[in-house]
Image (tube, rainbow, N blue to C red):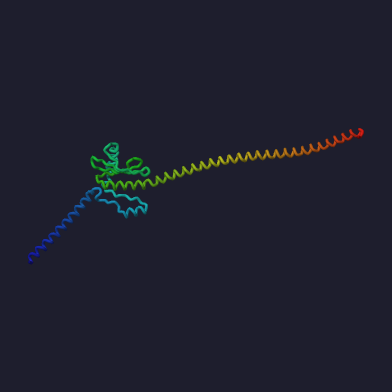
Amino acid sequence: MDRKLKLRRIALAAFIAVGAVQGVNAQALQDSNASAGVVSQPGTSTALPTTAQTAQTAQTGQAETTALTPDESRQSAAGNVAELQQMIHGSDLSELRTTYNGSYGASLLFYGKEMTYYVALFQQKNFWRVIKTQDAARADMIYKDFVRQTVQLSDVEIRRTQLEAQKAFTQRMIALSQDRANRLQADLDVARQQQSIVATQQQEKRAETTALAQQKLAAQDQLRVAQRQVRELQRQLESGLPSH
């Protein structure tokens, strides 16, 4: 009985020792890979920010950026931009999605012959950054992140466009208002000129009326004098005649 118990204890100790050795070897292998520059595949080593992190970033107004793996970060330098520029004119590349914000845009492209996705960030149709991956989920996540970047990058540009439009609209309204004011001023000048002419005419007519009234009085006086003279002459003429 004691012998069986001892054998069980020996087996358990050996099992624990083997597990410890495997753990040490795994840690050593991981450290060795890290020092040698070995990176994991896209989509497996880096996760997108959590929903809470996204909400916090939206509240603070900062851009949420999908963390790229070291391999993805080096891809543009490795010639992905030039590669995509050459492929974009061919018929084998399919455009799955494209989003524009101002002059910035993001595209998700698919090269079916190699089951490869290209995620591009561009400005005014000039590729800025291109990520290449065969992981569909990873490509979609990077595309969504590039779209978020275009929103942030285009904010100032869109605001500038709006302000330019508002400035042009205000200047146009000023010109219309000035033109209206000029026309009203011209109408007022004409009215004032006509009013001055009418006032002068009225003054002349009043003077003429006064003169005519005086001339009428003088003529009436002359008429009365003439009538008296006529009556006097008539009386003198009739004074030598016999009465009836």
Q: Residue at image x 75%, y 39%?
A: 213
Viewer-nearest residue: 97 or 69: 97
Q: Position of residue 119 (x, y in %)?
A: 29, 44
Q: Position of residue 111 (x, y in %)?
A: 26, 41
Snapshot quadrant of residue 4: bottom left
Where residue 17 sits in the image (x, y, percent)? 14, 59
Q: How many marks?
A: 0
Q: Answer with left or right where residue 243 lies relative to residue 193.
A: right
Q: Is residue 209 left or right of residue 23?
A: right
Q: Which residue lies most toward the front here?
A: 244
* The N terminus: image quadrant: bottom left
- Quarter occupied by residue 52: bottom left
Spot the residue most to the bottom.
2
Where is residue 56 shown, x and y percent of the image? Answer: 34, 54
Image side of residue 222 versus residue 26, left or right: right
7 relative to 128 in the view: left or right: left
- Vertical side of 124 occupied by 30: above or below: below
The residue that appears at 18% across and 54% down in the rendered structure is: 26
Camera-nearest residue between 222 and 18: 222
Q: Quadrant of residue 5?
A: bottom left
Q: Quadrant of the C terminus?
A: top right
Residue depicted at 33% across the width and 53% down the height: 54
